[in-house]
Image (spheres, rainbow, N blue to C red):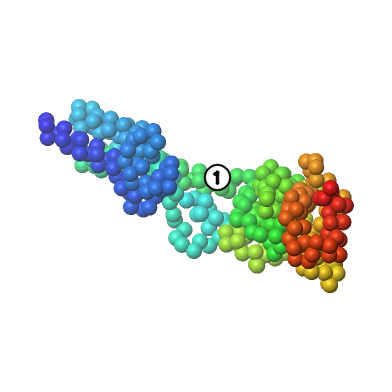
Amino acid sequence: MRKQRTTTIALGVLIWVTPAIIAGAFGWRSVWGDHNALLDYLFPLPFSGGVLHLPSFLLTSFALLLWRDGRSRPAWLPWVAAGVGLAALASMIDFERINAWLFTDYQPAASVLQFNRDAKALFIASDCLWLVALTLRAFPRPRWQAIVMPLLPLLVISIAVGGYQVQGPIFERHAGQAAELRGDHRYLVYTNQEYDVAVFEDWVLSGGVTPPWLDANAEHVAVLFTNSKQLAERGDYSALSADNIIATACWFEEDRELTVTAALFDCFADRQNTVERGNAAIAVQPRNLPDDIRRWLGGASICQGVSLDVSPEFNLALVDHCRTLRRRYPQAILAMKRNHGRDARVVRRVQQQARQLGFER
């Protein structure tokens, strides 16, 4: 009796630690935090991943005690455990990767078959397969259970693969990229949707990308919808062409205009952002002026008519540029006086411009 109790406790410990050892060996991270999953899964504390193991562990322990009792051994128990365990394993398969390989042009660099790091599925699979292993010697002869058992994992697989085919339009936003000029930003979005202005506009407006007036790094945004999953995964903007771009959405911060154009379109060609306007204004300043004077006068010239004392609805980047120029003006004018002389003509010119803009009272 004592030996049986010791064996039962040892089996319980083995069942408990198995998923923790598997997760730790494969380098999984903890459920809450960023440390190795081994210790996280070992302890059933409210703030650790081990607490998620308790439901399946308790059910498995109860099933084993029922089976070891010997008086009532339900013939369906091992078969159900095998089916549920295989279904849990199947649910960990990265079907998004497999579906992309089956139904798009995506060709993964590594193996097509990969597993998601799903702690709850691992706990269930490990516990169920332990239950199968411990009842294997007395496994009942297969009857209807032999047919039902594989249905569970097959059901998981068929839902995952079949669901991909019947779901609505797919939109997958991939990593954005700053364009050649600061303030211009573009996103690559994989989609299986045919060209439809309303659908693409609705996706953008419903949160597909961050509006440029809420993004500190973007003033003009281009959203490129591609039918090539391979190109989107690689983020290969150099391979963009009319053959693989379905539509281009252009979104502008200064007037909040959103336009959708078929095929590949350059959103930035006909629009100047604040950086471009400033550079253009600096370029037309007289060449005989010192560089710091030219830069300040050019940067300030685009602030003509810009209201700085009210919260803007449009032209946020321009207003921010002008407010920064006003805030830094006292330090800038002191540096100019030091470099060029307090009464230098170029300094007076800067002061005159500053008074016109309200920077200097």
Residue occupying the point 46% across, 42% down: 155
The extreme front residue here reads: 342
Q: How crowded is mark 1: few (under 14 residues within 10 Å), some or many (20 or more)?
A: few
Could you say where residue 152 lies in the image, as x and y percent from the top left?
41, 40
Of residues 226 and 160, the one drawn nearer to the viewer in this rendering: 226
Residue occupying the point 83% across, 46% down: 307
Indicate the quadrant containing the N terminus: top left, top right, bottom left or bottom right.
top left
Image vertical order of residue 109 relative to residue 48, above or below: below
Please give left or right for residue 334 compared with residue 58 in the image.
Answer: right
Could you say where residue 259 lies in the image, as x and y percent from the top left?
78, 51
Of residues 232 and 328, the one drawn nearer to the viewer in this rendering: 328
Residue occupying the point 36% across, 53% down: 26
Could you say where residue 352 lies in the image, as x and y percent from the top left?
87, 56
Residue occupying the point 32% across, 35% down: 57
Report the residue marked by disc 1: 163
**SS at mark 1 in the image:** helix
Please give left or right for residue 119 compared with residue 136 in the image.
Answer: right
The extreme bottom residue here reads: 288
Of residues 270 and 298, the one drawn nearer to the viewer in this rendering: 298
Q: How many labels does the image show?
A: 1
Whether residue 213 is visible to the viewer of this picture, yes or no, is yes
For badge 1, the amino acid type reads Gly
The extreme top residue here reads: 71
Of residues 239 and 92, the one drawn nearer to the viewer in this rendering: 239
Whether residue 257 is visible to the viewer of this picture, yes or no, is no
Please give left or right for residue 265 compared with residue 154 in the image.
Answer: right
